[in-house]
Image: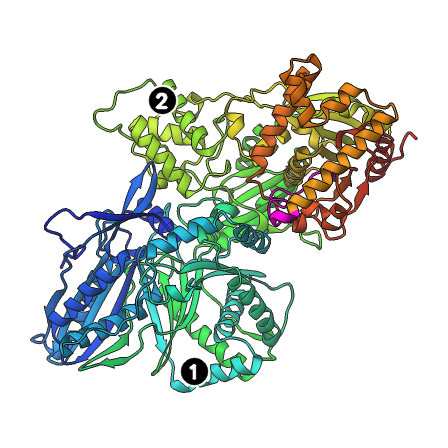
Amino acid sequence: MKETNQAVPTTAPTVVAEFPCSQTQLRCWILDQMKPGNPALNVAVRWEVRGAIRSSAIEAAFRTIIQRHEILRTRFVEVGGRPCQQVVDQVDFRMSVIDLRNVPADQREARILSIGEETARAPFDLSQPCLFRVSLLMVENDRGFLLITAHQSCFDGWSIRVLGREVGEISAAIEAGRSPALPELPLQYGDFSLWQSEYLESYGFEAEKAFWRERLEGAPYFEVVPDHPRGPVKTTRGSILSVAKPVEFGERIDAASRQHRVSLYSFGAAVVSALLHRYAAADKVLFGSQVAGRDDTDLENLIGVFINNIVLRFDFPSDMTFADHLRSASEIVTAALNHHRMPFNKLVEMVNPMRDPSRNPLISVNFNLQKAFLEDQRYGGLELISAPSQSPGVIYDLSFMMIGRPSGWRMSIEYNADLFERRTIEGLLDLWQQIYEIVLERPSALLSSLIVPEREIFQQPEILRSVPVAEQVLSSHPSVAAAAVVPTDGGIGSYGFVTPVPNMIEPLDRLPETLMTYLRSQLATPAMPQGVSVLLNLPRKFDGTVDRDALTVPVKTAPAVQVTPAAGKTSMPIDERTKALAAIWSDVLDVREIAPGDNFFSLGGHSLLALRMLSAVRSKLGGKADLELLFKQPTFSGFAGAIFGVADGDTAAKDDNPWSVSVCREGTGPCSLYTLNHPFLYYRLANELDSTVSVYNANMFSADLDGRLASMSFEDIARRVVERMGADILKGPIAIMGLCVNGVLAMEVGRQLRERGADLRFTAVIDAWAPGFVRSQPKLRRLRWNGERRLKRLGYFTRKLLAGRIRLVDFLREFNFSLGLMTRIGLQAGAYSDEEEINARVTDLLVDAARSYRPAHADGNPVLLFRSEANHPRARKLLFGWGEAVAPDTEVFDLEGWHEDSLNSNSIKALAAIATHRFGGRSTN
């Protein structure tokens, strides 16, 4: 039996509304683009129906609901590479009715399951409205089953409850000849999508990002080692094993939750995280879960997809009792739920994990605990009863589910059948129940006492034994200072990481090939790592040992795939197509140039940007590339080679870094201070510093400020600074300094320097408020602050004029009104010098780029804040608004002089003394 969307209008539907997609809809769209008709995105529901069943009344009820809820009359279309949702005026819904009353009683259940599986897996076409279908299976005159399948882009678990109530009430009203008693709907799903779009631009969303950035910092990718190796791409073939628990079990977990003063969900999350900690022998466990996302009461009666994924991280630094772990787990769950408005796809964009087409981003395991969405209830002569539904396809490797019904709790594990054997899941389901029994009886039991039986995994012992051997061989190479080898692909392979010796002569880019050749001469083929990467430093734990969980294995790339251009497209020479492709990447990613080795995702790309890029490739170049290909070939050269059929060496892109570095003074020692822009302000500082310190100035005074630099992100601008510094950042202690917006840039440059392994001694930030902080203040407060600053500025420069330390013309140039007046009347003194002009343009460019920049949380970067007389003393207390981006005890130093003047006054000696001290030297004065 083949079913499609059960809405076939006789005339073309009329679009009555268009909205942006919600973030969950965007994720569904992306997943559907990767695998059109993906059954894992279907939501399958099964209800048992008893009593006076009249199919016409039930179908009429569904028709009424479809007209009542716009989301059930919605389709998705692509505009410029970005999807949007369109609501149509009506759809011609039809409910299938299948009569099984003549099927022998002993064969009915199998027939119901077969039909249920088929309807659940039938694909949806997102371009067609009404992503929703229903079948009624009649098994007896007064008993049947409703099989409902909806696409996840328009339906979630809570919607089941809403749908059940409305089907029951409307069908009962039809039978009774009355109007249904349903609440008015003040909102539709499109209104929620509009609200979410606005929320993502709000200050509140920035707080959400800050929480999740800190929570997931340094988090590994957690997974349970599968029985079978992963294929090149993720599969959705799944199965589910369940066990029904007696009513008494529910009473016991309710009582235990009350006793420990935690929610039932927190108790369940603590059990599952303890299980995974012991089963996977992992000290960090992460799994996903879902929240309803209906914070407003006006959303409670809507059908739609409000659900959102959150990531729960549990750390196990040492052994502890279950009771202690439960308290910690409850705090973790509560904090995550308090920050549940971070859309999962935005979380993926922010964390930007390594893309692997064979894995989900961020989470491989999921957990949910909830009461059944459909309440068993009688509506007139009809009774609706919740029944276990069938899985149309799996999203996660493993999904632990607990569903509470009046008859008791049902514990289920849904699993990817291409990765796990049934017997493995049977053992895991038994272990889950055993751990529940242990912690219910003895909450004081140590987690180490939870016995996990030996698990037989045939594929990995030989590889795991070879890991230390390969590591030993790598460490023996004369160019290697330290090495670490980690298992990959669930233990069926390995990958090496090395740090080079300080005095290495060979270019770093050749070292991996040299080491792989060396390994082949020393190791048998089964023990060979898949590859080797060079790092500046191996990540370390507090005890000094290598933190292997923090080592990220690069995604394996598949061989280039030849893609045939679309019919009717004019063939372009390879070099022209490559340039056109580079222009598309540059435009989509907002970067000036693309180098052959640039990784789409490392440049800030994410799935939505990928869709835009692929849409442009299809329309401009005729290539039929898809997301799966991009995940396999994420570098520019690899992607170009795949769609054009050229080798990596045939692709090239111009490298034009906008930054240049000048030497203010060459020191005699290893320490280096890099200043940002304002090149002429820092020469005096260079002379005041200890003679061992080299002082450099990085500036954009020679850059093309009208080119793509103007649209480059703040992070990319900082990255180019670090790239221009080159290998010098690793030669010894380093520091970074910036004034005003260049101080903001110094914060990001400092973060990236530490990421690259530099010995960053301090970041000096002069008169730089955190981006967005001042704008976030109430308007009256901002007006008061600006008024104070103007009066203070006038007083400062007036005193300077009266003391004879500034010429009248220079005094007038300090104020916009008098400067503008001199310019209008044609006075030469009112014109900017070339240096002032370019400095103003560079400053404007950085200010514009900084508007969308949000600094990362403090990561140990030692920040020194400096306040000139241009800022009120309150800046000290407020730490210039940097909040969690700096440590609470960050020092703030006062400088004499107004803004730039502070670098030409007596304060320069104090600044030099502080900098020299932080480098561990002594000032020249």
Picture coordinates of residue 50 (x, y %)? 18, 80
Q: Which residue is mark 1?
A: 250
The secondary element bearing badge 2 is classed as helix
Residue 824 figure quarter: top right
Q: Do labels 1 and 2 touch, CB within 8 Å? A: no
Would you place residue 490 above or below residue 162 in this image? Answer: above
Would you place residue 590 above or below residue 73 in this image? Answer: above
- Any part of residue 485 in sight: yes
Residue 577, numbered label: 2
Residue drawn at the location 71% of the way across and 51% of the way down = 544
Q: Nearer the viewer, residue 259 or 900?
A: 900
Residue reaching furthest left?
102
Residue 726, numbered label: none
Dot 1, how many residues are within 10 Å of its Cα: few (below 14), some (14-19), or many (20+)? some
Q: Quick one: label 1 or label 2, which is nearer the N terminus? A: 1
Picture coordinates of residue 83 (x, y %)? 33, 43
Q: Nearer the viewer, residue 140 or 825?
A: 825
Q: Quadrant of the C terminus?
A: top right
Would you place residue 542 above or below residue 852 in this image? Answer: below
Residue drawn at the location 52% of the way across and 47% of the way down = 351
